[in-house]
Image: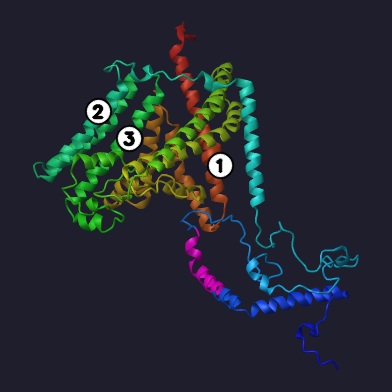
Amino acid sequence: DSVDEDHDDIIPLLRFSTTSLAEKEQWMSLIAESCAYCQSRKFFLEDASASVQRSLSKIFAEDSLPKQSKGTLPRLILETPKMQRNPSGSTTPNKRNKKFLRVSLKKNAANTNPLSVAAYPPSKPMHRAAGPSYLSDDAPIQNYRGLLNLMVIVLVVANFRLVIDNIVQHGFFLSNIKIDMAEFTHAPLADAPFYCGFGLLQVFIISSYLIEKMLSRKTLGETIGFMLHMVNANAALFVPMAIVWFFMEGRPLPGSFLLLHSVITWMKLLSYLHANSDYRTRDPMQSTVALVKDQDEFGAQLSYPSNITLSNIYYFWFAPTLTYQIAFPRSARVRPTKVATLIIRIIVVACFLAFLVGQIIAPSLDSLARDTAENEGLFTPHIAAHYLTKLSLASTYAWLLFFYLFFHLYLNLFAEILRFGDRVFYRDWWNASEVASYWRLWNTPVHYWLVRHVYFPCLRNGMSKSMSNFIVFFISAVMHEVLVSVPFHMIGYWSFLGMMGQIPLVAITKYIDKKIPGSSIGNAMFWLSFCIVGQPMAILLYCVDYFTMKNSASCEMVDGVCSS
């Protein structure tokens, strides 16, 4: 027997599936490399580190994932699969692991490759285990990111084609848009009703401050002070509404802007009244400072009545919130880069929104007016179905762009300038599995105001939850109708009916979500009722009413018959 002590030539008793000596030598080389690596200090250090990382990942896995809110769909995470590193030197092109590589000295080893032609004989079994198709229900979890990319590409190409067809058919409408500044000033009331309305809003804000100042000094009784506050707050709503109705006819854009800010001021002044009335009867340090985090040094020391200042109420008026409190969470500083970025994004998104309205929606509404006129003013189901499908996508895009423009960019811009810390102006409303969750999540400033100043006061006055919810929806429906009907100088009711129609839809989707938790049925009903049917139908109905009103005002009565 040979007494050769070279252990590299000792071949363990293994069974190979190949008869090629070169392949056997290559496998032995790989096994030796792996054994050498596993006996090294580097392997033990990396194994210990990986063990710690796995333990930490199990502990913090749930915290790192987005939380599922009540009434929303289960989370769906699309992420790039993480490639795990193989420590074997034969598959790792890391130069630090070259000491574990062992090159075979056999002549034929370099010419042998497992992927070569010899490795795939005609009898090689290709079906080695049972397994389902990738799209089957019993298939393992798959990554559909490529299909998501395809859907995005198809969506972009399809919509781009629609835009091109619209431009070819109607021309480039943005070239005809002209901004006339006389639209803001041509009116009897001091020749500037728009600016006069905003000036009156400042009067109501200062009046609210003076009333609260007298209440804090006990120079005004609680009952009289409350009545003055209510008269002043309601005047902030109804006086601008009267200005828009009587002095801004034919100018819906500036009228809508003024009326929107008057509604915001009305809500803020009511919150200012209720919150300070509460501060006068309980410890403000307990109700505010102990609950609010991320305050600055000045806010942490503030208490009633030292908060009753002009600067305080005007900060609240400009701040992106509707609910007053003594101190708000504050950011550390104003970031000029962030401000500039938000302004640029506002300009870009506003241009996209203007293009969508001017190029897609406006021509469709003009066609609607012509078709309705040709049909003797009748809005038939055929016309409604045609334009409903025509406007559904465009109105959905416009609504999403407006949401992003106002609730994300516009409010974040004011928050950054004012160092307003709490910037959760919305939550994941797009995952709402029931309509009630949507109304809680999509507009948190209004939701907070309704909960604090309408819902719970109704409960404290002995009303049931159902009646309190009804009042909340009723007030919201009235405000929606005011914001639409008053600037266009028509008495409508479609927004009011649409909001009140949410009440049975809330009950239906809540029942479905309770019976089939995690189902997408409620979410699909929400998208269909809001974006595909609700909003386009409301646009059509208001436009038909507006065209009818305009035609009635422009026609002349001849023998009891309207003649244009």
Amino acid type, residue under disc 3 in the picture: Val
Q: CA distance from mark 3 to mark 1?
A: 29 Å
Task: Describe residue 142's horizontal placement relative to residue 429 as left or right.
Answer: right
Tag 1 secondary structure:
helix
Residue at x-position 51% and y-position 18%: 176
Q: Earlier in the sequence, mark 2 or mark 3?
A: 2
| Residue bearing the label numbered 3 | 263
Q: Amino acid at mark 1?
A: Leu
Bounds of the magenta segment: 49-65
Residue under the image location 56 percent in, 72 percent down? 50
Colouring rule applied to residues: rainbow
Please tell me which residue is depicted at 21% across the width and 31% down the height of the picture.
Answer: 203
Query: Residue at label 1?
Result: 528
Residue at 65% in and 35% down: 158
Q: How packed is label 2: few (under 14 Cα within 10 Å), some, or many (20 or more)?
A: some
Q: Earlier in the sequence, mark 3 or mark 1?
A: 3
Mark 2 or mark 1, whichever is nearer to me: 2
Name the foreground residue: 108 vs 456.
108
User: Do labels 2 and 3 touch, CB within 8 Å?
Assistant: no
Q: Which residue is mark 2?
A: 200
Q: Is residue 319 visible?
A: yes
The amino acid type, in three-letter code, at marker 2 is Leu
Please tell me in which quadrant of the rendered image residue 209 appears: top left
* Residue at disc 2, secondary structure: helix
Q: Quadrant of the N terminus?
A: bottom right
Q: Position of residue 547 (x, y in %)?
A: 49, 20
Name the mark nearer the viewer: 3 or 1.
3
First-in-chain label (2 vs 1): 2
